[in-house]
Amino acid sequence: MTAYLIRRLLFGAALIFLSTIVSFTIIRASPGMMVVTDDPTVSQQYIEQRRHLYGQDQPGWKQYCNWLGVTRLFSSKADPGIFQRSLGRSSKYDQPVSTILPARINATLILNVVTLLFTWMLAIPLGTYAAARQYRLPDKIATIFSFIGMSLPGFFLALLLLWLFASRVQWLPPGGLRDPLNHDQMSVVNQSLDYLRHLIIPVVVLTFGALAGLQRIARANMVETLGQQFITTARAKGLSEMSVIFKHALRNAINPLVTLLGFEFAALFGGAALLENVINYDGMGKLLLDALYNKDSDLIMSVFLIGSVMLVVGNLIGEILLAWVDPRISHA
């Protein structure tokens, strides 16, 4: 297992390095330039000065080396980069990227962790229940809701919930992460409740969309497992149906879901860009869209780097968990 982990980590490091090259190439090839200001009265000289300040007037290969920190290895006058544990400086916010990301990461992490917990707590029991009653009324109802969840756009559901619960009945806040006026004056308990009230709509929207696909996968795996010979043998031995489903079938049907868990772990820091913009939720998705609009290279590259690292780590965790739940799998 140790040798396997070392090989996977080395492969992951190479994959992350290649992903940064591809990401930087796409950013450079995209049209437009760094947005400095929306004021049409600003002179072209000022714009060029700002581009020079952030290194936007240099060749692409040199900008990439500056971001990595390779230039700093040969010149102490160069700005630090990744090798010096610096993520660069945002041209839009005019401050280090490392000071911008923590608050956005925390917001997105809370949202996605809560969504992930609700999705898995509901998807596996619903998929198992639907598979055990295949083609009956509960299975058909679950299928209908799954198709609705997979076909209904998340931003439309968010707008619908905002209109109903925030505008019409006014039970929930109209988006955002917290109350912009009264949050700081609240007690700790009320601040926690304020965060929870703002999380209800985005968690419901994300869970409804993710639950649809995961529940169908869980159902399909359970249907396939329940048709295998060892399940027939277990029933022939006189085991109860609950024991057959949860002790024998579910343990074998859950293996493909563990693999999916690695990809969902990688998405924890990705955020839901469109949803976050609709509800004005200050997370990583909204930050990435703003950075792309302003062509904020250092900020974009930092977000992509985090996504690449989490994808590699998530897949590794998924493979380790799969070997743990299934003794037949061995990583030599």
Image (cartoon, rainbow, N blue to C red):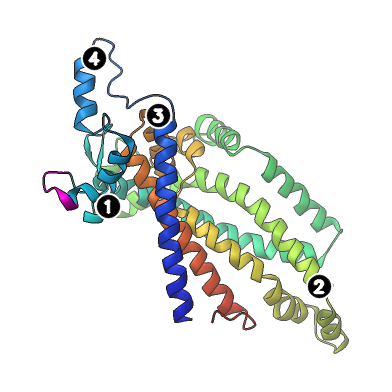
Residue in the picture at 28% in, 51% down: 187
| Of pointers 4 and 2, the one earlier in the residue sequence | 4
Q: Amino acid at mark 4?
A: Gln
Q: Nearer the viewer, mark 3 or mark 2?
A: 3
Q: Where does the magenta region start and end?
A: 73-78
Q: Amino acid at mark 1?
A: Ile
Say whether residue 100 is left or right of residue 116.
left
Q: Which mark is residue 293?
A: 3
Q: Secondary structure at mark 4?
A: helix
So how many labels did they put on this image?
A: 4
Q: Which mark is residue 82?
A: 1
Q: Which residue is mark 2?
A: 226
Please tell me which residue lies in front, 242 or 55. 55
Q: Nearer the viewer, mark 4 or mark 3?
A: 4
Whole-percent x, y for residue 208 in the image: 62, 48
**Is residue 293 inside the magenta stretch?**
no
| Of pointers 1 and 2, the one earlier in the residue sequence | 1
| Of pointers 3 and 1, the one earlier in the residue sequence | 1
Please tell me which residue lies in front, 188 or 325. 325
Q: Which mark is residue 44?
A: 4
Name the image quarter holding residue 176: top left
Whole-percent x, y for residue 230 in the image: 81, 82
